[in-house]
Amino acid sequence: MSNLDFLYKVADVLEAVAEEKEKLSSELDEIKSAQKKETIAPIVEKLSFLDKNADEEELVLKLSSLDEETLSILSKAAGADVPQLGGSAKLASHATSNNAENSFASWILS
């Protein structure tokens, strides 16, 4: 095998590595874009509900240009991360609430 053949093989390998890297990079960008859209959707829903004249596509474009930290803050402010009412919640036990009700009733009646 001559040096020229070896260099061609090295070039082929480097080209294959570059193509694979580009493919993985585009897949990563698609995943990040999908995650960002998932984060933006509830915010756009809340904002469009507040302002009926707002164009949803324009809101999506503006929000997609924001960094992750700002989107996280907006998501929390819009209540997207807050559990819905009726969801699982930690409640006081029945005995504790009964004692509290009895104490309150005795205080009211005294």
Image (cartoon, rainbow, N blue to C red):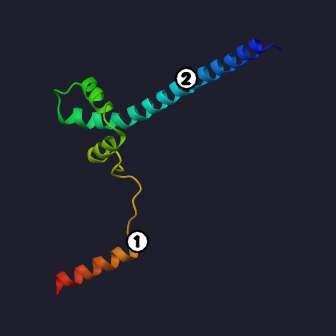
Q: Residue at x 47, y 28 (%)?
A: 29
> Quick check: 74 left or right of 3?
left
Q: Which mark is residue 2?
A: none
Mark 2 Cα shell of 10 Å, populated few (<14), some (14-19), many (≥20):
few
Q: Residue at x 17, y 29 (%)?
A: 52
Q: Amino acid at mark 1?
A: Ser
Disc 2 target residue: 22
Q: Residue at x 36, y 40 (%)?
A: 68
Residue 83 locus on image (x, y percent): 36, 50
Q: Kindly state the secondary structure of the residue where label 2 is placed.
A: helix
Disc 1 target residue: 93
Q: Nearer the viewer, residue 28 or 54?
A: 28
Q: Amino acid at mark 2?
A: Glu
Residue 95 locus on image (x, y percent): 39, 76
Decide: is 29 above or below 67.
above
Residue 79 locus on image (x, y percent): 29, 46
Cβ atoms at labels 1 and 2 below 8 Å apart? no
Q: Nearer the viewer, residue 9 or 60?
A: 9
Q: Nearer the viewer, residue 89 or 97?
A: 89
Residue 15 locus on image (x, y percent): 63, 18
Mark 1 Cα shell of 10 Å, populated few (<14), some (14-19), many (≥20):
few
Question: Splitting the image into 4 quarters, where does residue 10 fall?
Answer: top right
Q: Nearer the viewer, residue 77 or 10?
A: 10
> Quick check: 10 left or right of 79?
right
Q: Residue at x 65, y 19 (%)?
A: 16
- Marks 1 and 2, how far apart at CA: 57 Å
The C terminus: image quadrant: bottom left
